[in-house]
Image (cartoon, rainbow, N blue to C red):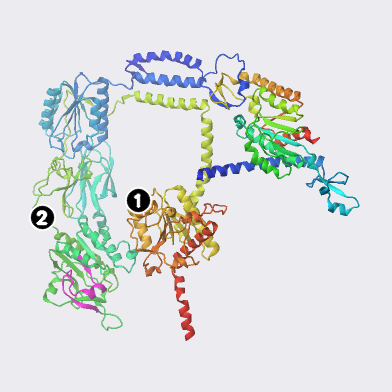
Amino acid sequence: MFSLGGITFLTPWILAAVAGVPVLWWILRVMPPRPRSIKFPALFLLKDLQTDIKTAAHTPWWLLLLRSLIVIFFILALADPVLRLTGGMPGDGAVLIAVDDGWSAAAHWQERLDKLKEYVTVLRRTNRSVVFLPTAPEAQDGKIHAYGPMKPDEAEKWLDHLKPYPWPRDAAEAAHVADDTVKRAGVTYAVYLSDGTADDPADMSALFKSLEAAGGLTVVNDADVNTPFILRSERTKPGDVAFTLERLAPAATDQSMILAAYTAEGNVLDTNKFSFPSGKTTFSVKWDILSEMRSKIARFALEQPQMASATSLTDSQWQQHPVGIVADPSRKENAGFLNEVYYLRRALELNGAPEIDQPGALLEKSLSAIIWPDSAALTANERNDLFNWVQGGGFLIRFAGPNLSGGAEDDPLLPVHLRYGERAMAGAMTWEKPAKLGPILQQSPLYGLDVPKDVTVTRQLLADPTPEVFEKTWLQLEDGTPLITGGNVGKGFVVLIHTTAGPDWSDFCYSGLYVEALQRMIALSSGIGSYKPDAVLPPLLVMDGFGHLQPPDRKSVIAAVDPHHDFTPSPATPPGLYGDSRQFHVYNLGDALPEMKAVNLPSTATVETYKLSGEKSLKSDFLKYALWLLALDTILTLWLRGLFGSFVKTGATAALALMIILPQMAQAADIQPADLSSGIYLAYVETGDHDTDQVSFNGLYGLMKAITARTTIKVKGVQNVNLDTDPLLYYPFLYWPMTENQPELSEAAARNVQNYLGRGGMILFDTRDQQFGNLNSPTLGTKKLRELTRHIQIPELMDVQPGHILTKSFYLLDDFPGLYTGGKIWVEKEPSPSYDSVTSVIIGGNDWAAAWTRDPNDRARFLVTPGGEQQREMAYRFGVNVIMAALAGNYKSDQVHVPYILERMHRQ
Amino acid sequence: MTDDNLSRAEHLAGKLPGLLLEADKVAHTFMKGLHGRRRVGQGEAFWQFRQYQPGDQRRDIDWRQSAKRDETFIRQTEWEASQTVWLYRDASDSMNYRGYKNLPTKKDYAEILLLALGIVILNGGEQVSLLGTNLAPQTTYNAIQRLYETLPVQTHLTQTGRPVAARSEVVLFSDFFFPIEQLTTYCEALALRNVKGYLVQVHCPSEKTLPFKGRMKFYDIENMGAEPVILPQVEAVREQYEQKFISHQEALRAAAQSWGWRFTSADTSQRPEDVLGRLYNDLAVKK
């Protein structure tokens, strides 16, 4: 071995090749560079020139230097350079590496891995195989295995899968496996990467004994790396948060630490910074957290180190009570002060956002309660589904209102029978005063809540006064009429509030009671579930070694937990959540662990720390340098031969052109919605085919000029739209040419188009292939049209009849030519009267955009056949008619009646 | 027509009128100077009147002119007496060369000169035609358009076309990068018929100075298959090459003189107006 400036060469004889570099220098110098070639006219003059120059032009010295460097780097790489070489391990057989991977190893896990990798590197250099022995039982079968012997390359891959487990090591079992392995695999040396903690002293010494039997033992232990913490939750009165934090060994100085509260999604909700005093191994953390915040906390955990033992999961009440509100989620009014959903959402907000959706969607989710404000009108089917849900055990909170007052006769989703119509206590037609709230009786589930004095109810639905109503009444008015009633429906439960959820019938929604009563009701809904506390709990989410929750791995030995026994963390029952999504129980690792004990190392073992020696093979680095220089050499050689000149110039020109063009393009595409809504824009659908899009743009631009010149409509511009992303509502009219390669519409695009058509938009579909046939025998364009519109509901079509709005909305037209003529134009058969009976689709194949196209100099671009300029004029007229129909609706078709109207006026 | 062809046609159409325009500009820049110096008042009407003499055709009598005066006049147009200048530009591949991006190709340069000369000649009342084409000698100023359109037909010097009339004049634009012998037969035959001639060598500055450096491989632009010439160090032979270039020019000049013709050379970096002045002043038809 040969060392040079901290670098050791393992194959030093290769370095002798450096002596060959001067020879290479000489050869390169003699060999001329390849000539530049050029085409030249006066060759006959060049032919017989006499030259006395024998040696060709030289390779430049800097190129020679570069090439020599390349060769030198290659030689150095081949000589196996190693930086900071370490001594290695005694013996020459396999090495057994036992590594702690129980819960306490999660602290500074990366340092452990790095140390392991360094051992593998050293073993690779000395060409020894390795056996790994993780000391915690495996998740797969709950047993301890030794892996190997394997080659160092294989070992490096194996290490990628090594992770700490959230349960303790099993030293006694590990000692047995170590004994077997030492005998079986020809192990001559052992290394033990300790996590600093100890099990039962007898088991630990058995393990050390087994390892030392291999021929020698190095133990890696390090107070900086082995810093496990245990977070134990304190038993206090409900609602308080307090922990005891325990560490392995007292620190010399105060250590500042951060305890963080996380939501179920993993976001940090709050942090608590504190200082762990020096010289102590336990510390109490008390934490005042706002009660509404506490309900959102899913776990508490130390920020550093992240480990399962320093993570405390919470079983917050509210997370088990997801609530749904029946409403149309797309309706904007949800935010308004007059809307019922607004008050409901505000009332429930503290406990996490309620789901607001249509009943169909709500029923698919597992919700503990559904709230049905009166303003949400349900179809018969939806009522039926909701009824079945309640029958099966659902909890429904229902509000009265105008809808219910008319249809309460045989509604099964009510706790009590209601009288027809509502009782109004204030208003023009009544002399009663608005009623105030009465006391809450003791049998009511709402008992204990404060009743505000100032809440008044002006309208309510009255229950039929049967004896059972009294039992079902949760809250009543001064006069004893029920305001909230609740009762069983099938296995489920229905609560009815006899007034509206919003302020229409009462100011109940402004009161604190509204919020508290809703929360009380939802809390009650948990009693409805199918939770049986005497059954065993299946795993729901389990922790990994770092305290992160994951779904249980079905291939492992994870089993259900019996809630009547004490929880013991093990491969079968790792810490985590057990139960189902409605009702779960939390088992934390920290609460189940005994006090930590530091490990006693045997005096015979060599002790190392986790600090890396920094040994590193430089082979790949040197190879990398050589290849970089080689690439540089190639570029320089090309440049010397003049091959770059043209590239560089062309590239520069193109770049310059791009710089000029791009800002313009960006301007064209960068129209803000505010601009779009400030005027009329003609829009076309991007097909992805550049030529077609260009024609569409220019065509609409030509049409825009024609419209501006001929009518009073002021079109502001032409805009391209992407159906996937762009909102279409700004455009009165959309031109959509068919191209061969248009991709199928995504779901979002189809919905976008459907919404556009359903809200009064107009699309001109242009198959652009009139010359090839017509709609009766499908052409390529027609097929494409059918393919693209497969997911769009297009109404029944008919061909344009004489007298149709398109024939007279501005010009009187008989046919509708574009670049081609003839063929039929198809329009909606029965356009919706709510959009002025204007067709929402026009389908044809005359390639109108091409006929409308004008170049920037206002010249026509495409030849119109067969009618020439006359036909182009007709194409413009058609375009004007289409836009006029899209903008002005059928006002022209009203004119049909003008003669009759005039005639009748004359008669009078 | 496919879009591709269309755009190419547009490209060509865009380029070529530019050439004509350039020639027109050159010609007029030159003629402005000419006007001031010589033929003041020479208008487009190109006729003269002469007293009727016995033997003149009766149909030549200009009755209107005769009615104004006592004498009888006949109308005589001057072009009857005018001479024809036959123009030619080499269209071989070597003419498409240019050594610098900012200079025109030799062919473009030669065509600008040719057309500008055509304009000036037509303006002077002489006739112009293209060697080796069937274009009849043209007279009016507007004929320059026809000349321009016929130009692509002219591809080769030995091509048969309309015969050159005796005592007219030919002007040949070429780089003359070939042995003089190839020119001799053709030119001597013309010289024998008393045709005056003018050899105009159009070359790129780089063809004279050979401004390249280092090891270079030169291909024949007209024959890529031929063995290229490899020079280990171009700068070493530069002087030698320039000598050879000049002696080639001298040989051309000597040959021209032996036929009673003239020779001049123009490199593409010169202003075409200056070259045109030189040409026109030396042109035989003018005298």
Q: Tell me: residue A355, above or below residue A27.
A: below
Secondary element at tag 1: loop
Q: Tell me: residue A592, above or below residue B228.
A: below
User: Camera-side residue: A456 or B48?
Assistant: B48
Secondary element at tag 2: loop
Residue A455 visible to the viewer:
no
Q: Are marks 1 and 2 in contact (CB under 8 Å)?
A: no
Residue type at mark 1: give it.
Glu
Q: With A482 as the anchor, is B199 left or right in this view?
A: right
Residue B5 horizontal/vertical position (percent): 52, 43
Q: Chain of mark 2?
A: A
The disc placed on residue B270 is none
Depth check, mark 1 against mark 2: the one in front is 1
Q: How dense is the environment of label 2, judged by Cα within 10 Å: few (below 14), some, or many (20 and up)?
A: few
Q: Quadrant of residue A549?
A: top left
Is residue A414 one of those drawn in magenta? yes
Q: Chain of mark 1?
A: A
- Residue that numbered label 2 is attached to: A532
| Residue that protrudes farthest toward the right in the picture | B70
- In the image, the segment drawn in magenta is A396-423
- Residue that numbered label 1 is attached to: A744
Q: Quadrant of residue A401?
A: bottom left
Image quadrant for the N terminus of chain A?
top left
Q: What's the distance in space between the residues labelled 1 and 2, CA to CA?
A: 51 Å
**Nearer-N-terminus badge (1/2):** 2
Residue B231 horizontal/vertical position (percent): 57, 19
Please tell me which residue is depicted at 56% across the width and 53% down the height of the picture.
A859
| Residue that protrudes farthest toward the bottom in the picture | A908
Q: Quadrant of residue A218?
A: top left
Q: With B167 as the anchor, is A398 left or right in this view?
A: left
Is residue A201 one of those drawn in magenta? no
